[in-house]
Image (spheres, rainbow, N blue to C red):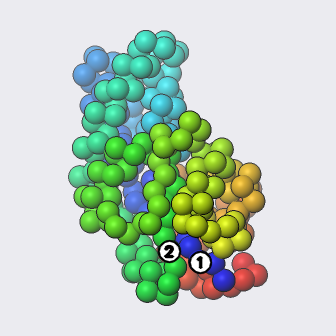
Amino acid sequence: MNRAIIFDLDGTLIDSAPDIHAAANAVLSGEDLPLVTFEQSRSFVGRGARIFVERMERAVTGRNTPTLTDHLHTRFLHFYERAHENTRIYPGVVEVLEGLRSDGYALGLCTNKPMGPTRAVLAHLGWERLFSVVIGGDSLPVAKPDPAPLMAVIEGLGLTLPQITYIGDSETDAATAERAGARFGLFTEGYRHTAPEDMYHQFRFDDYRHLPTHLKDPAA
Ligand SMILES: O=C(O)COP(=O)(O)O
Ligand SMILES: [Mg+2]
């Protein structure tokens, strides 16, 4: 049986797309650049803040200019740290996390969101002490889909690969788990672009009430 469950954050535990969209357009309007749609903004999420900004810049200017990317990135981080007013926890998440804790699982967080905004949103949600180990997109020199951040969470928990399951919503998370050789549960209601059946996973779910059953099934 697993000793810990490690979660992705955006699109997995929380729907932060509205706040990320607002932060993106706050940056763009401050620079007199065209705005991005909600759908565009959501499709840029998954590979961390720098790649989000590069995708956004390319969408509105047609290219990436390193000095402008640097500037937009700095401005984005400024707004991102305050962007959680419209962030919502997915239904059933709180009950499941509490249940896992009382069943003796440790909880870890492995997100590509930078640590500043991650800490800010965890504090906003009252989740500062929920996760024993938190690794963000800028915690290490490499980010997901490199498996190093996931391995760092496992190591921080004092565990080994067979003792954990990773839960995430995106192609990035699936690739991270596959490259690490980790058991992966796909939450299908987040920000993926690919059909679930075409993504690496050992089980998938669209409702958090079904997660504990999957976790208890060693064959899943
Ligand atoms: O910030 C991102 O790009 C994605 O964040 P996530 O890894 O929590 O989904
Ligand atoms: Mg995600």
Residue 154 vs 74, above or below: the answer is: below
Q: Residue 151: where, in percent of width, then height?
A: 63, 55
Name the outermost residue toward the front.
158
Q: Residue at x 29, y 42 (%)?
A: 81
Label drawn at residue 3? 1
Q: Residue 179: where, in percent of width, then height?
A: 74, 51
Looking at this view, is 138 or 11 the one in front? 138
> Label 1 sits on what residue type?
Arg
Total labels drawn: 2
Q: Residue at x 39, y 36 (%)?
A: 37
Q: Is residue 172 visible?
A: no
- 1 and 2 marks in contact (CB < 8 Å): yes
Looking at this view, is 90 or 175 the one in front? 175
Tell me the quarter of the picture where residue 132 sits.
bottom left
Tell me the quarter of the picture where residue 29 sits.
top left
> Label 2 sits on what residue type?
Ala
- State which quarter of the image contains the N terminus: bottom right
Classify mark 1: helix, strand or loop.
Answer: loop
Left-right relation of 147 to 62: right
